[in-house]
Structures are given as structure tokens and as C-alpha cells.
Amino acid sequence: KAGVTQTPRYLIKTRGQQVTLSCSPISGHRSVSWYQQTPGQGLQFLFEYFSETQRNKGNFPGRFSGRQFSNSRSEMNVSTLELGDSALYLCASRLKENTEAFFGQGTRLTVV
Amino acid sequence: GESVGLHLPTLSVQEGDNSIINCAYSNSASDYFIWYKQESGKGPQFIIDIRSNMDKRQGQRVTVLLNKTVKHLSLQIAATQPGDSAVYFCAENIQVGGSQGNLIFGKGTKLSVKP
């Protein structure tokens, strides 16, 4: 069974631009969560989607948004990029509540 | 590879020794806990989990202990091997309203195994 797939793996953007990252969950998983990982802050929860609805949201500005499609694939968007948005963005999918989350390899975003 | 920060706690052990990685969690209402291993350049990988109605669970070479009284979680790795070198994160599942909740991660501990 294929794992969680994130694209692209690496991305370089300029301050002020916007970016869209994609995540395909494990087949059958309807919950998709996004995390930002930085050396200073560790793994921070961005948001979680289930059946195309955002159910939980972390403490990030409105520049960070996401959506989920009917096939459970998810995208996250960051607008007006700042240098501090440089991070590894990880996507995780879960089959059901209180089960482990499976992570993708992440997208390494560098803002210059 | 993935840098996990200058301030990450580090545990250095000799190959073959046992390792114990500790984690303090934040919410007494958390009902599910997971340990993840993250190697350089990769996403976190599931190691073992435990539910709040248990205080110990064993896997292959790993044991997780849960102490709800002091909100403490530990991961024990038996006969540590060089391949165990990685950053280890604990995560707690915090219920939010009627949803299944989200996983909140600790800062991580870097395990370094000396051959």
C-alpha cells in the first residue's frame, strides 16, 4: 500500500510570493493533518481536515490555509511568504481517531 | 539532512546499552500517546503507541511507559543499535470538541549511538 505522498520535495520561493503544497494520504484515510517543522519550534500543528472540512486549526496566521478534496487529497497554501516560513512542511494521514498518523517525507520550503 | 535545532536534548549511548527517552506531556485529558522516530531527511515514523487506560506497552525492543499522575511518558529501547540514531518525538492526542483531536508533539530528543 502506498504511503503518504507529498509534492514537491523541495521548493525555493521569494518573499512575498505564495506557495501551494500537495499531499496524497494513504488510500482509505480521510483525515489529513499538516505540520510545520523548524529547528527552533519543532513540529507545530497547522490544521487538520476530515471529509473536506477543516476540523482543527493551530495557532498560525491567516496566511496559512488549506483544503481537502473529495478524494481526500489535501493542499496547503501560504500567501505573502516571509523568511520565517522556511521550514519542512509535513503532512500526515490517519485512518480513524486515536490511531497513529502516518507521515510523508515532507516538502522543504526555503524562502529567500 | 534535517537539522533539528541547537537546543535539542541529546542522549548519547553505547551500542548494546539500553536507552531511555523521557517526555512530559501537557494535557491531563490527553487519551492517546505515540512515539515517533525521525531520521535525517525523512518524515517521522511510528514506533509505538499507548492509550491512557494503560501504563505500559511493549513492542519489539521498545517499551513505552505512561505515568498519568505526573503526565510523563518514556520510551525504552533495549540493546540500542547504530540504526536507532535519530530524533525521537512523543506526541499526545488532544481531543478538541467533538473531533478526533490533533497530535501535539514534544520538542524531541536526539539519540546518538556510539559503535
Image (cartoon, helix red, strand yellow):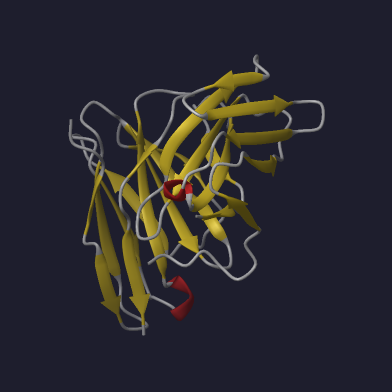
A31 vs B105, nearest the viewer: B105
For the point 39% across and 75% down, the residue is A81
In the image, residue A44 above or below residue A33: below
In the image, residue A13 above or below residue B84: below
Residue A91 picture location, percent across and down: 35, 48
In the image, residue A77 above or below residue B54: below
In the image, residue A61 above or below residue B29: below
For the point 31% across and 78% down, the residue is A17
Residue A23 picture location, percent across and down: 25, 48
A17 left or right of A45 in image: left
For the point 29% across and 78% down, the residue is A13
A84 vs B23, nearest the viewer: B23
A16 left or right of B7 in image: left
B99 vs B115, nearest the viewer: B115
Residue B12 picture location, percent across and down: 62, 56
For the point 52% across and 59% down, the residue is A60
